[in-house]
Amino acid sequence: MARGERRRSLTVVGGARGEVARYASLLPESGGPVLVLGVAEGRLAEALVRRGALVTGVDPSPRMLARAEETRATLPPEVQGRLQLMRADLRSLRLSQRFVAVFAPRDAVALVATRPDLEALFVTAREHLGPGGSFAFDLSLPPPRWLFPEDVDPHEGVQPERAVFTPHLHSRRTRQGHGDIHRLLLRHFTAGEVDHALAAAGLEPLTRDRDFEGRPWEPGSDRIVVVAQARTTAQRS
């Protein structure tokens, strides 16, 4: 371990309360086409298509897409047709279709490794939004005590030698008492890094909450839930 680096564990269990309802609330009554970046096992995508939405789910991992295909196979035939899955790099994905909403749920934005990568992912989201469309994502945030030495005031800032917080996410699915574990390496970002990346990508945050129940985000919150829209030409100038 490098000097100043510390090991911590972060456990993520299932979906947070209100997750599906919050994302679904951003859709029009028609359901509209939805793009899910980092579809993973397809749990949010499944919930949305069951509500009538047309969903395109994208993930860079063949293993995660295989799990999403398993999820789709459990759906009624008439619902399966509403879910399209594909493998692609979330930073460079460019589809001809535009969507009423783009979602990056369950720490999907932490799949990228650097701030430029994060900005590229946000540009992908912006490029696929239709007029008035919403981009929403949620991200768990590391407590300051995990990032800063005990004798450093986190509000004063510190220049680490390299990224010091890289959580490992373990995913387990059980079947008849047996299960397999998949490990993902995530790069978590601070709220400030998220704000800078959104601005660089031409996105304007509409809401910043600390949970899916709409409580406003505040320093020290362990999660941030953001809803953003593309900036207008006037806002960019």
Image (cartoon, helix red, strand yellow):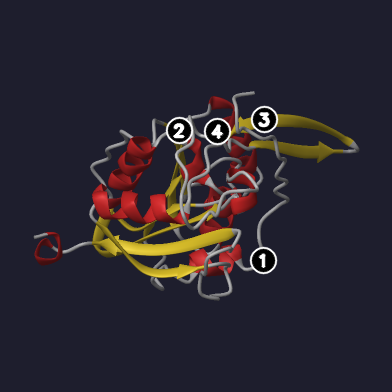
Say if residue 38 shows up in the picture.
Answer: no
Quadrant of the image occupied by residue 204: bottom left
Pick the front one: 28 or 50: 28
Q: Are marks 1 and 2 in contact (CB under 8 Å)?
A: no
Secondary element at image label 4: helix
Secondary element at image label 1: loop
> Label 1 belongs to which residue?
17
> Label 3 belongs to which residue?
183
Q: Are marks 4 and 1 in contact (CB under 8 Å)?
A: no
- Residue 199 horizontal/vertical position (percent): 27, 55
Q: Quadrant of the N terminus?
A: top right
Q: How many C-alpha atoms fall within 10 Å of the one at disc 3: few (<14), some, or many (≥20)?
A: few
**Which label sits on residue 65?**
4
Point out the residue furthest to the front here.
Answer: 151
Residue at image position (82%, 33%) is 179
Query: Which comes before the other along the chain, label 3 or label 4?
Result: 4
Quadrant of the image occupied by residue 65: top right
Say if residue 142 shows up in the picture.
Answer: yes
